[in-house]
Image (cartoon, rainbow, N blue to C red):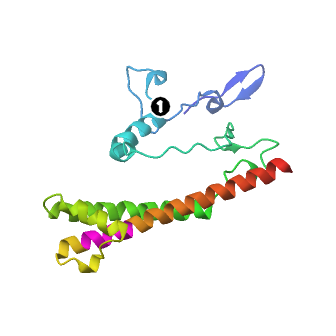
Amino acid sequence: MDQDLIVEGIVVPAMALRKEQRRTRYGTLADLPDEELADPDELERVVYKEMWWPILRLPQQRWEPAIRPNIGEDGRVDWGAFGTVDFDSYRPQSSKLRYKAEQMKEQLKDRVNLLRVLSDRIPGTAKYKILGLVRKGVLDPDDIQDWDMWQLAVGYRRAWRLREQIEQLLAKSRKQREQRLKAWLES
């Protein structure tokens, strides 16, 4: 059992004089000082990067926020004294018309892919002349006898209408944005 020591006339238990040894989650090595060991958080990051590298390599769209908050010492977002003032002025205006146009663009992209598949099934270049006549309104798709060509003509006409609707929505959205800007400048 440890003996108590007397320091300047005060009895100090031996337990109080022991130096606390810091334990690490991953242990220690006999010949290597603790300062040279890898940080446990760093080891954890390396393991997670190795586990999730296929997902981390997927392309992503970059989105930069208009407001970049500071990160405090505790790792949390520190908005500062003026962090709550008028976030709406920083946020870009959302337009329902532009959103609808983006959704319709996705539909158009799908339809164009389908039309490519149908077009590949039909040999020759006469299909392009027939599609031109259908677009001009000279030929009705219901007058076409071949099933694949009929599907191509009907799909082409629908895709053409969808493209026109997208253009109209985008033009209307631009007009609304210009009006809002004009009203803001006049105020």
Is residue 74 at least partly visible in the picture? Answer: yes
Looking at the rendering, which quadrant does residue 43 occupy?
Answer: top left
Looking at the rendering, which quadrant does residue 59 occupy?
Answer: top left
Q: Quadrant of the N terminus?
A: top right
Query: Where in the figure is residue 139, as x and y percent of width and height?
Result: 29, 73
Q: Nearer the viewer, residue 16 or 119?
A: 119
As displayed, is residue 39 above or below residue 145? above
Q: Count of labels shown? A: 1
Please indicate whether residue 163 sits to the left or right of residue 143 in the image: right
Residue 163 belongs to the span the image colors magenta: no
Determine the residue located farthest toward the bottom in the rendered image: 142
Determine the residue located farthest toward the right in the rendered image: 187
Looking at the rendering, which quadrant does residue 73 occupy?
Answer: top right
Tell me if mark 1 has few (under 14), some (14-19) or many (20+) residues whose alpha carbon lies within 10 angstroms of its own. Answer: some
Please indicate whether residue 85 sits to the left or right of residue 24 in the image: right
Is residue 86 at least partly visible in the picture? Answer: no
Query: Where in the figure is residue 157, as x and y percent of width and height?
Result: 35, 69
Please indicate whether residue 3 sits to the left or right of residue 157 in the image: right
What's under tag 1, amino acid-wise?
Asp
Residue 155 belongs to the span the image colors magenta: yes
Please tell me whether mark 1 sits on a helix, a strand or a loop: loop
Q: Nearer the viewer, residue 186 or 23?
A: 186
Q: Look at mark 1 in the image and give the residue it sits on.
A: 39
As displayed, is residue 13 above or below residue 109? above
| Residue appearing at x 43%, y 40% in the figure | 44
Q: Nearer the viewer, residue 132 or 68?
A: 132
Query: Where in the figure is residue 158, as x and y percent of width and height?
Result: 37, 70
Query: Where in the figure is residue 15, as x and y percent of width and height?
Result: 62, 33
Q: Nearer the viewer, residue 129 or 99?
A: 129
| Residue appearing at x 66%, y 40% in the figure | 68
Stretch of the chain drawn in magenta? 151-159
